[in-house]
Image (spheres, helix red, strand yellow):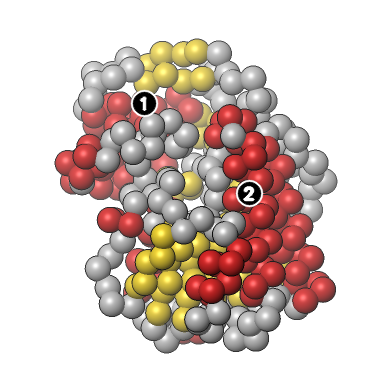
Amino acid sequence: MSFESLKNARVLVTGGAGFIGNNLVRKLLQCEVSQIVVLDNQSSGMAVFLPNDVRITFVGMDIDRYDKLNFVINQHEFDYVFHLAAHFANQNSVDHPFSDIQTNIVGTVSLLEILKFHKSLKKFVYASSSCVYGTTENMNEEAYIYPSETPYSINKYTAELYTQYYAHLFHVPTLSIRIFNTYGPYELAGKYRNVIPNFIEKAINGEELSITGTGKETRDFTYVEDLIELMLLGACSDHHEGEIFNGGTGAKTEILKMAEIIKAHTESVSQITFKPARNWDKVKDRMSDTSKSAKALGYAPKTSIEEGLQKTIKWYKENYDKVKSLKNYFE
């Protein structure tokens, strides 16, 4: 799809050095934006992976530093803001609840408070999380939710409410995308990172793939290119009142099957083992209802779990030397 309104646009991407941010920045460059400012403290991403392009300006900082954030943003007149910066994710928030509040709530409110004075802004796209659904079985945007499983789920939901508050009271044009278990190139393994990059790295090294739970649990694994498509569809749409849209694929995959696909495509000798589920993880099955995103935005994810994992493993192998040199960064 063509995103004509992005041509020559001035864009801010918070968390732009992270894996989703990196993929978003690359797609924005293809859309011929005129400027991208990337804000990132590199706590879970690396600026070294960003493209070498004169249109990109990197600023290393924490999103909750209001004075510095205000100084940086007020040097520009942004057309679009993609807010991906986050304290990621559930276990990290359990271990560090105050840091989670600072980044996921204080950081988001700081950004919105500054941007409410920027009349050039066409859209603020907030990267929320499927974790806000908790154990709700009906994962559509109209479902009643009251997340309380982890600080991460609480704070991501709270930030959604703030995007609606700033839209309704101050007319900041916002919308939120609830992200479902996204994976793809540029995501590194690490203690608080997602299961797929950790399993890929372990499989390449012949280490055991340890599943927390029975392996029969399911998740809606979404290839990053499909998520980026949804974000851009949202940015270019007329929706601006804090509306919420699901990412995801509308299909679920067993954790065990995902591990077996990774083993097969890495030709790994790794053994698959099992250990008890973490005490906060009560979700047995997670699958997105994408009907609203499809109808309102034309969202149509294209990448199967098999194809997406093949692409991700290919990138990991081709960049293994660089990845290996950064191996301990997130541990």
Viewed as shown, does residue 164 lie left or right of 227? Answer: right
Q: Report the amino acid beneath label 2.
A: Gln
**Where residue 227 sits: x, y (%)?**
49, 57
**Where residue 114 sits: x, y (%)?**
65, 73
Q: Nearer the viewer, residue 75 or 189?
A: 75
* Residue 217 vertical placement versus 288 (above, below): above
> At numbered mark 1, what does the secondary structure look like: helix, strand or loop?
helix
**Where residue 247 sits: x, y (%)?**
58, 54
* Residue 45 vertical placement versus 294 (above, below): above
Q: Report the amino acid beneath label 1.
A: Glu
User: Rounded to the nearest whole Å, what is the CA distance between mark 1 and mark 2?
Assistant: 38 Å
Viewed as shown, does residue 99 lie left or right of 16? Answer: right
Q: Which residue is mark 1?
A: 260
**Where residue 194 sits: x, y (%)?**
45, 37
Viewed as shown, does residue 210 lie left or right of 284? Answer: left
* Residue 31 vertical placement versus 282 (above, below): below
Give the residue drawn at x 50%, y 82%: 76
Give the residue drawn at x 75%, y 78%: 171
Give the residue drawn at x 50%, y 13%: 275
Give the residue drawn at x 43%, y 30%: 191
Q: Where, by quadrant of the figure, is residue 48 drawn?
A: bottom left
Q: Which residue is mark 2?
A: 102
> At numbered mark 2, what does the secondary structure look like: helix, strand or loop?
helix
**On the rendered image, what quadrant is the N terminus found in?**
bottom left
Earlier residue among tags 1 and 2: 2
The answer to whether marks 1 and 2 mark residues whose Cβ atoms lie closer than 8 Å is no
Q: Which label number is shown at residue 120?
A: none
* Residue 327 vertical placement versus 277 (above, below): below
Dot 2: few (<14), some (14–19), or many (≥20) neighbours within 10 Å?
some
Residue 228 visible here: no
Q: Where, by quadrant of the figure, is residue 176 drawn?
A: bottom right
Residue 267 visible here: yes
